[in-house]
Image (cartoon, rainbow, N blue to C red):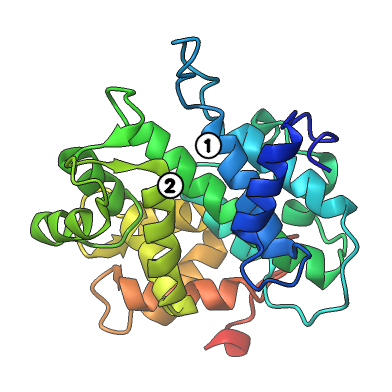
Amino acid sequence: MLHALNMNIDAERQRQLFASVDTDGSGTVDWPEFYSMLQQVEIEDQDVDSHEGTPGRQFSPELALVRTINTLKQLPMEDEEPEVRASDLRRELAMVGVTKANIKSLKTPAWFQNMLFTSQTFPPALVNAVMKPVKQFVRARLFTMFDKDENRSLDLEEFTEVMKALGLGRTDKEAEMLLQEVDIDGNGTIELVEFLDLLELIDSEMSDEDRILCCVRAFDDKAQGFLTLADLGKAFARMGHHLTPQEVREFMSAADTDGDGNVTYSEFARLVQHAEQMTTTNTAVREGSWR
């Protein structure tokens, strides 16, 4: 499988990788373990070759995403109950500005784009499985976006900015404490592997509403703590819900109970949950169905 993905790794390294990810000792590699192995190989490719003294290939979140989801599509999967919706995937990708208008720039396969933006049905197991590589893509892309000096690590200032961009609402002090917890080598920075592990841990402790709240905090560019009517349509669009102006006004009317013209984070989270019950074809909203 690794050779099919153009990952030319010698037999000894393959054995080492297999042993490192076969955490349950079953002698086989399941999907989560296989994904961990792919991620490890992709990241290793960016390291400096100690023998040649030349930089390795720059890690590409986009390439890692395409490779991984294409691999997933080829793997046999058992029947599963749906746990992930297309709207969940769109919401994740919106965190780094990926929408229907620019998804092609990622060079993802057509079937993946159809999964996100059409009513075409896919096996629930496949939809469930692509969530992890999508999340890892978003996190890795944010890492590279905020690694301003391109030294493949984040210092405290860069780390604080990326945590705010993720909507995790960390103060400077909280960000510093987090960095110290995960800075295993004590060099005052966080590398990509450490960063991905940290966000995986944070995500495992979050509810669906927490994830929506993170998104809306990330979209509140002015850090006002609320969204105006003008902001609301943009926020919905960034999360993959392209509503008509009338639909946006109806949502605002339902949520803005005190009539101040603003929607709080928690109110917006509720609206998103209702919007995700709508079809991707902008089915008209009937007020009584989502109040």
Residue found 24% across the figure and 50% down from its top? 183
Out of 53 and 86, give the one closest to the viewer: 53
Q: Are marks 2 and 1 in contact (CB under 8 Å)?
A: yes
Q: In the image, residue 216 lies at what x, y percent?
A: 37, 62
Q: Which mark is residue 43?
A: 1
Q: In the image, residue 278 lies at what x, y percent?
A: 68, 72
User: Can residue 142 be spotted in the picture?
Assistant: yes
Above or below, 246 against 158 in this view is below
Which quarter of the rendered picture does the N terminus lie within? top right
Residue found 21% across the figure and 50% down from its top? 222
Residue found 46% across the figure and 48% down from its top? 139
Residue found 36% across the figure and 30% down from its top? 152
Q: What secondary structure is found at the residue carrying circle 2?
A: helix
Side (left or right) of 60 relative to 178: right
> Which residue bears the numbered disc 2?
193
Amino acid type at mark 1: Ile
Q: Which mark is residue 208?
A: none
Q: What secondary structure is found at the residue carrying circle 1?
A: helix
